[in-house]
Amino acid sequence: MAVTAEVELLYPIPGLSERALEIQGRARRFVDDVLIPREEEAERRGGILPDEEIAEVKHEAIAASLNGGLHSPQHGGQGWTRTEWALVEEQWGRSTNAISWHVPNAYNVWDHASEAQAERYLRPALKGELRDAYAVTERDAGSDPSRIKATAERTDAGFRINGEKWFVTSGDVASVLIVMANVIEGGSPLPTLFVVDKGLPGIETIDDPDFTHTYPDRHPTILFSDVEVGPDDVIGGVGGGDDLQRDWFSEERLGIAARGVGSMWRLLEETVDWATGREQGGSRIFDYQGVSFPLADSAADAAAGRLLTFQVAAMIDAGGDPKLAHHKASMAKLFVSESAWRCADRCVQAFGGRGYMRSNVAERFLRELRVDRIWEGTSEIQRLIIARGLERRGVERILH
């Protein structure tokens, strides 16, 4: 199932380059030709596509130059701007079941990797040969990473890691884990990220819970018991974990916003098409304000969320204040994640009984979009970050 070579230019944002528009069109073709046709099969199979289907998704993504978007070409990535990346994330959001997770990629912390780390992990990841996972959250440290209890004790050979990590997305399929742990020096904890090979002794999956969505990767709980790593397995330097994690959170939150906009786009397209063709009581159901007005509200939400999301991306590309970008990314994530779930709920209602079937795109989005109000910081945490921004950066900078 090859991606159509023809590229369509879509709804340009003022100032987008021809390159950005070409990337956007290429990503849309990939979603339409490769991802969306596989959604219902993925749903029927509990999120797990056959190996040959996964291989095809990877192959087509690499052939379309959609792998490793933000990573540098020297490591096998595309070197996209943040705006170009957000345009692609928006397209990923138009599909359900997280089949886009099979597109080869890796976390942004690898930008700080040593050449040896990049050679061993990053380059293979961008070729689709291995997966990584981020192990940060703990039983008592979710939205507040300062409560992390995992430790990394210095040894003659490097470090000894002990701790328990929850909700390790892709931890079931990853070959390498990026682990946040505190190095204790002088009585003070130094939050540090470690590159930990999944095959090392002392790593054990102790729980593998089921979740609401039907995605290809799971979110297990992983226990680290006296896991020995070398001095070169630190990424970003001892004590550099908080700064790298803040960058990671900002990127993830902006990505959630971009994907949420894409989700609303797909939801509204499918629901408007249904409602304008479905008749009840002698009229199209779209002509009843109880159906069309909620969709109109969601269209306004989608348009506003899109502008906010791409404003943040453009600010980052222009070299704007990273701390301000952190606040604004939280604002985009908050607004879009809340709006997208409302949109899915409204669309399920418009479809009626059909909207409660798992073969219906609105039903799948209703389950999938709910977690966007929780992971990478709950909506309540985003409100705290925005409120602090209003106080520290000023109202004008946050709004403009």
Image (tube, rainbow, N blue to C red):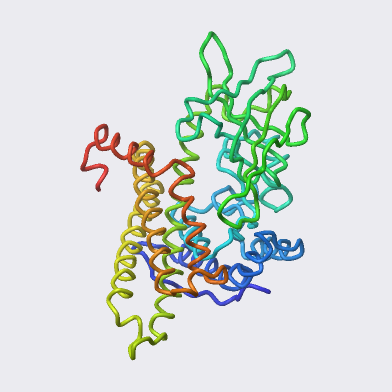
Residue at x-position 60% and y-position 73%: 33
Residue 262 horizontal side relative to residue 98, left or right:
left
Q: Quadrant of residue 275?
A: bottom left
In the rendered view, tell whether residue 285 sits above or below residue 130. below
In this picture, residue 204 sits left or right of residue 250: right
In this view, 331 is above or below 89 = above
State the residue in front, 222 or 31. 222
Q: Position of residue 376 (x, y in %)?
A: 48, 42
Q: Quadrant of the N terminus?
A: bottom right
Asked where in the image residue 288 lies, by quadrant, the reply is bottom left
Q: Is residue 312 left or right of residue 243?
A: left
Q: Residue furthest bottom?
A: 282
Give how far across and how far down residue 66 sits, in percent: 59, 60
Count of picture labels: 0
- Could you say where residue 387 lies in the image, as x and y percent from the top left? 28, 37
- In the image, is 49 to the left or to the right of 253? right
Q: Position of residue 159 (x, y in %)?
A: 68, 20
Which of the 4 image quarters holds residue 186? top right
Is 94 rendered above or below residue 153? below
- Residue 210 higher or lower than 90, as above or below: above
Residue visible at 31% across and 60% down? 304
